[in-house]
Amino acid sequence: MATLAIISDIHGNAEALRTVLEDIDRRGIKRIVCLGDVIGYGPDPAACLDMIAERVEFCLCGNHDHAVFYEPFNFNLAAERAAFWTRQVFEDEPDVARRNRRWEFLGAMAIRMEVGDMLFVHGSPRKPINEYLFPDDVITNPQKLLQNFDRMEHTTCFVGHTHVPGVFVDDPYFEPPNELPEPRKFVLGDEKVIVNVGSVGQPRDRDPRASYVIVNDDQLEFIRIEYDIDTTVAKIQANPLLDDFLGARLREGR
């Protein structure tokens, strides 16, 4: 298999997405897939959706993509307001063809994809759009993880959604990237694993750098990239319909 870059959870953060795409190009990687949540929270939903539509082999439907296309469900106030604002941004596009392309791209997002022995979803194998698999679940809710492993017909499943990168093994156990046997690298074998690729646009593991994963044959590598956070924060703060917290959290990676 040709080298593959897996990105997720851009959340309307164009500065982070551009920086990640530049890093992928610098490495000569031609194949990119996205696990969803291209939009929601961030200040540049249209630009991010356009970049994703142009660059990726496929993009899955995340819960925020779903919320903008349909309705936000079980969202906090800041997320709900951002979803309605994002929808209005798309509707206000004066270029009818461009507006239609964006809505068509959102509406065509699949909820899961299979490539060889790999499964790609946004949330989890059993609930592809909206189930969270948290690192703490290995202690507080191991049955949830074991049920997801039981549902897997593939050896490897790639997810996003929690914005926390790392590898779940079916003990169950969670290994963050800096605790892997070779830091930030993991060798795929015969055992089932669920790999969270982290978030491009809103990391929540206390590391503000954009996160994504590269898969090369049987080895995957977690990548972290610094980007212009201040510009994204300023855009959020300048928008009265986006909560300032959505910018502040970017600096702290939470």
Image (spheres, helix red, strand yellow):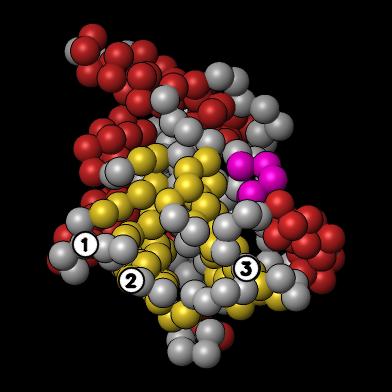
Question: Does 17 appear in magenta?
Answer: no
Mark 1: which amino acid? Ile
Instruction: Please name the residue that numbered disc 3 is placed on.
Output: 192
Question: Crowding near pointer 1: few (<14 within 10 Å), some, many (20+)?
Answer: some
Q: Residue at x 56, y 27 (%)?
A: 67
Mark 2: which amino acid? Asn
**Which contiguous range is marked in magenta?**
124-128
Is residue 176 positioned above or below 195 on the image?
below
Element marked by disc 3: loop
Q: Sequence-wise, which precedes: disc 2 or disc 1?
A: 1
Left or right: residue 61 compared with residue 43: right
Q: Nearer the viewer, residue 108 or 70?
A: 108
Element marked by disc 1: loop
Q: Quadrant of residue 179?
A: bottom right
Question: Crowding near pointer 2: few (<14 within 10 Å), some, many (20+)?
Answer: some
Residue reaching furthest to the bottom: 181
Kindly report which numbered mark, 3 or 1, lies closer to the viewer in this rendering: 3
Question: What is the x, y in percent for residue 82?
Answer: 50, 31
Q: Residue at x 49, y 57 (%)?
A: 118
The secondary structure making up most of the magenta span is: loop
Are the residues flagged by discs 2 and 1 in contact, CB closer than 8 Å?
A: no
Q: Sequence-wise, which precedes: disc 3 or disc 2?
A: 3
Question: Does 127 appear in magenta?
Answer: yes
